[in-house]
Amino acid sequence: MVSILRNTILNFTNRITFNHLSSSFHLLASPNFTNLPQNTLLAPVVPTIIPSCGFKVMGRVRRRCKDCYFVRREERMFVLCKTHRRHKQMSMVKDPKNTWILTHATQSKVRPW
């Protein structure tokens, strides 16, 4: 990490040349960057993802305002809202293990087979 940082600083300082014919008395008072590519300094940062609020996963969904409405999709209840997008909610889905219907169970110390 340190070597990468050192290399980038050295490359950056090698690209900078100062104009010795500047009007100021001292060289470092007003440096003129002549051979520095302008596109590297002020390059715009383009976001690769668009931030958006996701659904709140809740055990019991409820309407938070008069514009909220319920939608049922893929065994879940959703609450959507056109005016306040932050009201989006979805219900939890139970683990399939917890939805099994137990048809036969015996409680004994010795198995019958």
Image (cartoon, rainbow, N blue to C red):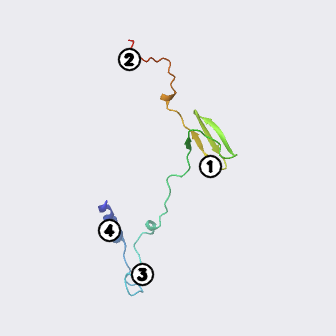
Residue annotated with mark 4: 10
Amino acid type at image mark 2: Lys
Q: Nearer the viewer, residue 36 or 13?
A: 13
Q: Which residue is mark 2?
A: 109
Looking at this view, is 34 or 94 the one in front? 94
Write down the quadrant of residue 106 in the picture.
Answer: top left
- Image quarter of residue 112: top left
Horizontal and vertical percent for residue 21?
Answer: 39, 84
Give the vertical position of 46 relative to 87 (above or below): below
3D distance between C-alphas at marks 2 and 1: 57 Å
Disc 3 crowd rating (10 Å Cα; few below 14, some 14-19, many 20+) is few
For numbered disc 1, what is the local secondary structure?
Answer: helix
For disc 1, the marked residue is 85
Location of the N terminus by quadrant is bottom left
Looking at the rendered image, the disc whose residue lies closer to the viewer, 4 or 1, is 1
Q: CA distance from mark 4 to mark 3?
A: 21 Å
